[in-house]
Image (cartoon, rainbow, N blue to C red):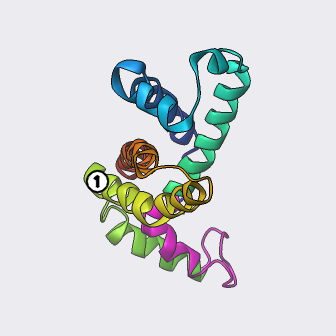
Amino acid sequence: MLTFNMPLSAAVAVLPLIIGFVWYHPKVFGNLWMRETGLQAEQLAKGNMAVIFISTYVLSLLLAMFLHVVVIHQFGYQSLFQNEPGFGTEGSDIMNQIADFMSTNGQRFRTFGHGAFHGLITTVFFILPILGINALFERKSFKYILLHVGYWALCASLMGGIICHWA
């Protein structure tokens, strides 16, 4: 039976922190980010970085767990049978059927590229609308939206690719 790979999710959840360190660095997009958000370096220095980094990691872990279901299609197959009698019981008819299916199809579409593609699709159809709606009501610019959506496209693509290939 397919399950979440928690050690891999825990490792992948570090990616938004690493990518964010580079992406939002003043020599990359940091100055643009500060300008578009209206933040000053003095304001940023006042934040509790331990709380920010730990919270970011926990939220990234939730995203990594969600991406398992998005990038690994076999989760969808298994979910079709979760209410069937014997689901989860080793040797039951339904578990034997699932095992047969997984032995034939368990590795289909399990590549880095496929996972990265679905991470990108998740950004376009899930993350962009959420960030875009918030930005519109906050009266933020199109640059602001592109800046953050670009960051999440990179994060979700890398996270999805790693999860799909190695989970």
Residue 134 at x, y = what percent?
A: 60, 57
Taking depth in this image into account, of 34 and 164 the one nearest to the observer is 34
Mark 1 nearby-residue class (10 Å; few <14, some 14–19, many ≥20): some
The image quarter in which residue 151 lies: top left
Q: Using the rendered image of the protein, determine whether residue 4 is visible from the camera's viewpoint.
A: no
Taking depth in this image into account, of 49 and 68 the one nearest to the observer is 49
Residue 29 at x, y = what percent?
A: 38, 29
Residue 106 at x, y = what percent?
A: 37, 65
Q: Magenta region: which residues?
A: 68-92
Question: Where is mark 1, residue-wise?
Answer: 111
Residue 128 at x, y = what percent?
A: 46, 59
Q: Residue at x 42, y 52 (%)?
A: 142
Q: Secondary structure at mark 1?
A: loop
Q: Does 137 appear above or below 15?
A: below
Q: Does residue 90 show up magenta in the picture?
A: yes
Q: Residue at x 50, y 55 (%)?
A: 67
**Left or right position of 108 against 47:** left
Q: Residue at x 43, y 25 (%)?
A: 31
**Left or right position of 19 against 4:** left
Residue type of the residue flagged with mark 1:
Thr
Taking depth in this image into account, of 161 and 47 the one nearest to the observer is 47
Q: Does 26 appear above or below 108?
A: above
